[in-house]
Amino acid sequence: MEFIESLPRRPTRYSPDSQVAGELAQTFLAPPPEQGRDLKGLLQKLDGAIDCALETAGPGYMAYIPGGGLYTSALAEFYARSTNRYGGNAFPAPALTALEESVLRWMAQDVCGLPKGSTGLLTTGGSMATFSAVITAREDRLGEEFTRGTVYVGDHAHHSVRKAARLAGISARNIRVVPSGENLRMDVRVAAEMIRQDRAAGRRPFLLVGSAGTTDTGTVDPLPALADLAAEERLWFHVDAAYGGFFRLTERGRRQLAGTEQADSVTLDPHKSLFLPFGTGALVVRDPTKLYAAHEGTGSYLQDLTSEGGLPDYSHMGPELTREIRGLRVWLPLHVHGVSAFREALDEKLNLAERVHDRLSGLPGLEVPWHPDLSIVAFRVRPRDSGAAAAEAADEATRELLMKINNDPRVLISSTVVDGRQTLRVCIIIHRTHEDRVDELLDIIEEHCPVTEVK
Ligand SMILES: *Cc1c(COP(=O)(O)O)cnc(C)c1O
C-alpha cells in the first residue's frame, strides 16, 4: 500500500548511472545459498531492485503500451497462489473454473460482441493468445496439409502476429504484409488483390488479421470491410485487440472498434486496457469447439480428471497443462470495482488523448499527422520542406526532443518509426494517469520543442 501511494512521486526511470544498475544486477545473479536467510533482509534487497527499474506502474509512464497494475488484482493473485488450486481441468476446482469461465464469456460476448456460446482462454499475454489463434485457424482451414498456407497482416500490425505465424509452421514467404494507405489503415482493396493473386499462384490463403489499435499510433483497421473480405474468401478473421479491445466498454470505443463482432477470434490483453498487472492475456473465439480441435490432447494418467459438468477443461484449449486459476486476477477487480469503473477510466483516457492531440496540434514546431482513434498520440518535429535533407534534420531534432522530455523524471514517452520518419508517441493507458500529469507532460513538450519548423 505504501508503495502504491508513493507512485505519483516516484521517478519514471532509474538513475542513468548504469554502473550502479549493472552492479546491482550482478549481485542478483548469485546462486541460492545452502542455508536460508532472513526474509526481512531479502525483502529490503528486493526493494533496491524495484527502484532500479522503469516506473511502469506510475502516472507518468506514457511510453510503449504500459499497464499500471491494479492492487486488487495483485491481492487476487496472492490468494490464488497461496491456496494453489489446479486450473488445468474443471474437475479439481469446478467453482473456480466457473469463475474463470464467467470472465471469458464476458470478454467474448459483452466486450467483443461475439455470439452466445463464444468464450476462450486466458493466456499469459497477447502474443500467446495470437499464437493459439493462428494454430486454431490453421487447423480449421487447412488441416494437416499447410505448407502452402498463407497469412495476411497489415504493415503496422504488431510483430507478434508474424512471430505467431512462424511458430505455427507458416513459412516466412507465406506471411504476406499488406500495405496501408496514408491513414495507416490496411488497404482492403490491395489485400483482396493479393489474396486473389496468391490463390492463382497455388498458395492457400487461410487467415486475415486486422488490428483493433496498432501499437505505434493506436490506429484501427477497417474491420467491417476486412470481415467481409474474409467471409468472401473463406478466410479465418482474427482481430488483434491486445491494446484497443477493452475500449469497447466505452461508447466511442465501441464505434471505433465496430467489426470486432464479426471476428472468428480476438486477442485481448487485460494487462493493458483492463489495467491488470503484467501476465494476463486472453483469446476469445466465436466457436470454442475449434479451439478444442486444435489443442486437445490427453494421457491415461489424467483419466480420473474428466468432468461432465459442462465446464471447460482449459488444458484442452491451449498449449499449457498445469496452470494456476488464472481467472481470479480478472474476476476480483471486476467484482470489487464494477464494470462502470473500468468504463469511466477508459473514457477518461480517450479524453486525455484528445487533450494531448489538441494542444500539440497548436504548436507550430510540431506535426501531429493523425487524429487518435484511441489513446495514443503520435507527433514529430515539423521539417522546413518536403525534401530529404529537411526530413533528416527534423528526425534528428525529434530524437533530441525525446531525450529532453525523458530527462524529466515526472514523465516517460517512447519513439518509433512511421513512414520512415522518427516519431514520438504518447500512450495514455495507466489508470493512475490523470489530467494533472498529462498537462505536466504537455508543458514539458512545449518547453523543449522547436518554436517553429526546423531550419
Ligand atoms: C502488446 C501487443 C501485443 C503483444 O501482446 P503481449 O501481451 O505483449 O504479448 C500484440 N498486439 C498488440 C496490438 C499489442 O499492443
Image (cartoon, rainbow, N blue to C red):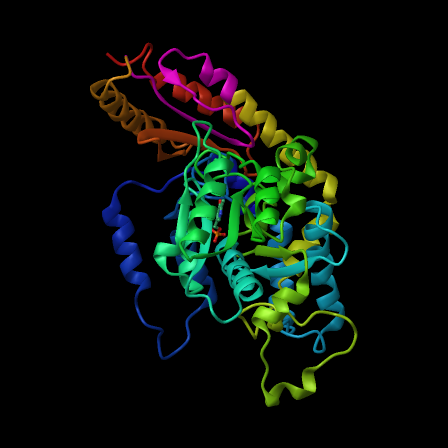
The spot of residue 173 in percent (x, y) is 35, 55
Residue 372 covered by magenta stretch: yes
Horizontal side of residue 388 vs 367, given as left or right: left
Q: Is residue 4 above or below residue 119?
A: above
Q: Residue furthest front?
A: 200
The spot of residue 265 in percent (x, y) is 61, 54
Q: Nearer the viewer, residue 427 or 40?
A: 427
Horizontal side of residue 46 vs 22, given as left or right: right
Tell me the quarter of the image containing the C terminus. top left
Q: How many marks?
A: 0
The spot of residue 206 in percent (x, y) is 51, 56
Task: Please report the residue visible at 45 percent of the width from the left and 18 percent of the height from the top.
Answer: 360
The spot of residue 311 in percent (x, y) is 74, 70
Task: Please report the residue visible at 39 percent of the width from the left and 18 percent of the height from the top.
Answer: 367
Query: Start and end of the magenta stretch?
Result: 357-384
Q: Is residue 77 above or below residue 307?
A: above
Horizontal side of residue 332 vs 217, given as left or right: right
Residue 72 in sight from this viewpoint: yes
In which quadrant of the rendered view does residue 300 lie?
bottom right
Q: Nearer the viewer, residue 36 or 257?
A: 257
Task: Please report the residue visible at 56 percent of the width from the left and 36 percent of the height from the top.
Answer: 222
Residue 15 covered by magenta stretch: no
Q: Is residue 145 above or below residue 407?
A: below
